[in-house]
Amino acid sequence: MEYNTDVHTLLISADYEATEKLKFNGGIIFNWGQAEMENLSAAYFEGKDPASFGYDHNLAFAVWEDNSDLDIEEMEYYIGCSYDFNERLTINLNASYTDYSDEEPYLYDTDGDLLLVNAGLTFRF
Amino acid sequence: MKRITQYTILALCLVLVPMLAWAGQTTGSVGIGIQGVDIDDSREGAAEYKTADQGANPTFDVNIDGYQSGMKYDLDVNYLDDDDFGGRFDMDIKRYFRTKNSYQKFIHWLENDDLVNYNDDPDFQFPAGMTETSPLYVAAGTKAVMGKPTVMGANVAIARNSSWGDDLYVTREELVSENEFLIPGAEFIKIHTKYRMEQREGYEQTRTVSKCAGCHLAADKHKIDEKTQDFQIGATAHLGLVTLDYTFLRREFDEDSKAPTNFYLSAGSLQKKTVLDASDGESAYSTTPDSEKDSHIFKAQIALPMNTTVFASYVHTEIENNDAQDVNAGDVTISDDPSFDYDAYAVRVTSSPVSSMTMSFKYHHEDLDADDVVVSYDDTTYDPQGANSQAVDPHDFGLHGYSQGHDGWPWERESSLSRETDTYGADFKFKVLPRTSVLLGWDREVDDVDAEWEETADTYSIALSSHFIDHLHFRVEYSYEDIDDPFAHENAAYADPLAMQAWLKANLDPAGCTSSSCSVKDLPLPGSAKSTEYYVMYNSRTLDLTSEPESVHKFKAHATYHITPRIILGGHFDYDLEEVKIDAPGHGNSFDKEMFALGADLFVAPMDNLTFTFAYNYMDMEDQAFLSSVAYGG
């Protein structure tokens, strides 16, 4: 039995200072993970005839490999900005969106997406 | 509770900020905000470590940093949710008292396995009686009959998740407080203490078999209420060229939730063959015992002439299982009082007699003594040899094989953890060019396991690290590990599976045997091989299997190049090759395990007010394993 894993991670980000008071940032993070069982060989030697089960042993062995397949794609986009009203007061706005795709669900489908929006005031002293 | 926490943090902000803002050399900030959350579909992937309550939630953060009258302090608090907040507080009072404190809490959403293991194969169909939303699988042959609620027919495979659809999660919180005191008038003595608390609360999935073997599965959620506490106190004395340190550590682990229970199904005519069945009632499984650990740690360091330092240490540790007791599960009794004693001695000498060379020599001895376990098995019902028999030698049945080394029941099972480990080695660092060093190393680890196994591993390494070229730094490293006699599963596979198969087919109970004349008393199953699973099949395996390598090659390289002050390029490369050698004809050949990783990052600042970062990482890993298992059908 062989087990292979491949993981790719990519990040692109940028920071931009439009003025002394206004700043922007943004980026993309991409994760792609794949794993699979290969060449599973289950040679078995029967001591007696199998009992009359309600399932097929040969079918069970045939799909065994596929049950361990993993194929996850996660893409996160984020963007933010801050503005300094003065030396003491700043407003921050940030948002991120994450799209999580489970291309080979084996427990149950974990596809989902998340949107986060943050807004805040910072007072310095 | 949530509102109490929010109001407490808000009150802290309102009181501390005006007070400290007036104070002389104090700076900081207070932030208030709002977080909006929207989740579609499953949150276990997209928001695995986020509290992520739908809707809008208030957020706070506070930072205070200051210095007054010889007292330095630094405070940070971040609050997103009752299950997602943290902070730290550090203070130094004229160096006579230093404290570092931190607290962090977060949540981890877990998956709820329905036990279906379906996939997106378009040909896949749920078995009769089971759907994605009703994960109860009953696959019945024509003979199977669902009888009494606690008794299954002989040929029924069943999978049941009793908590399907429930949220499963664990919140983890950690509190750490480290403190140091200098004794006035005897400042060469420092008292140090540390307290650490880690708490896990929530629900995890637990699984067990519901009847016999792995065809019959049951899952439920299990409440988690674990607390680990470390209490540490010690003293350091700086006595000229000698530094001495003693630390005492007590670690307590408590699990306050009740263990999950399962009502095991009786298995029709196989009833007497299973360890647990309906007659045992609700039976606990997946229990986590409380435990305690005490450690005494002594360290000494001596500075000698010619830039030479000698470091020595001794550690004595005792670990106790507080809940250990004899376990009587059905017909099996396990006498178990697991405790561990651990002693370790270490010495290391480091010297730089000339500026172009540093050398280091080490020796480390570890002695781990784990208690053995006594297993009793009341086999009077099943054993064709009579009560309390010894292990059977397959040669008695005309088979080759080995005889498992025990003399009947009770059997003392020696712990595979008990061992003595010796490690010694040497490292040399030579400065061969300006800002360029070569490192050479060797160490040997001899692992002598009480359960009759000794593994020796030699590791040789060479590395080159250089800043010789302006703006370029790189390091390349290669190590080779040669392992003599790596650990293996002894007697794990059949040398001649066909001989085993032929024997099984030639040794069947005759048709018409009765409960007293069949080879297994009270289990009249004419046509079955004679008690083979207990007394012959396992003992007939003679080949060793392993997935541990005999040789390991590791190559690492990384470099950073400042092309211009505005452009920085970095990269890394890792390759590991493990060569596993096994000699098990018919089961598998020697094989390799490989890991390859590659990455690059680029920082570019085209203008003073604009920067870009690009990064890419790739990892490829290939693993392999062999298994020879005895499986039973019904």
Image (cartoon, coloured by chain):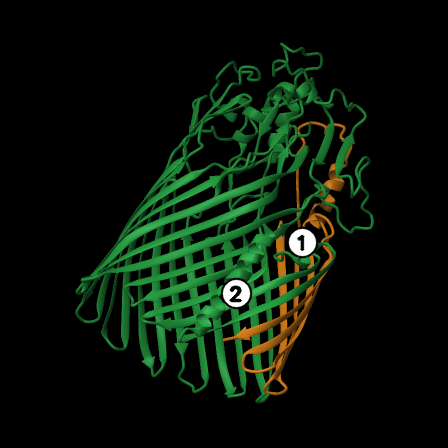
Residue B602 vs residue B320, the one in the foreground: B320
Name the residue located 57 percent from the left edge and 89 percent from the top edge: B608
Image height of A22 relative to A36, above or below: below
Residue B604, x across and y down, in percent: 58, 84
Up the image or down, A105 lies above or below B398; here it is below
Name the subunit of mark 2: B
State the image quarter where residue B517 is shown.
top right
Residues under labels 1 and 2: Cα distance? 36 Å
Q: Which residue is mark 2?
A: B14
Q: Which mark is residue A62?
A: none
Tell me which chain appears green. B
Count of numbered tags: 2
Q: Is residue B153 visible?
A: yes
Tag 2's secondary structure? helix
**Nearest to viewer (mark 1 / mark 2):** 2
Q: Which chain is orange?
A: A
Q: Amino acid at mark 2?
A: Leu
Query: Dot 1 corresponds to which residue?
Result: B44
Residue at x 45% of width, y 37% of height: B290
Residue at the image point whose x is 39% and y is 65% from the top: B461
The amino acid on which the numbered mark 1 sits, given as a three-letter code, is Glu
Residue B575 coordinates in the image, percent (x, y): 52, 65
Among the two numbered marks 1 and 2 on one chain, the one whose residue lies closer to the N terminus:
2
Mark 2: give few (<14), some (14-19) or many (20+) Cα within 10 Å: few
Label 1 residue SS: helix
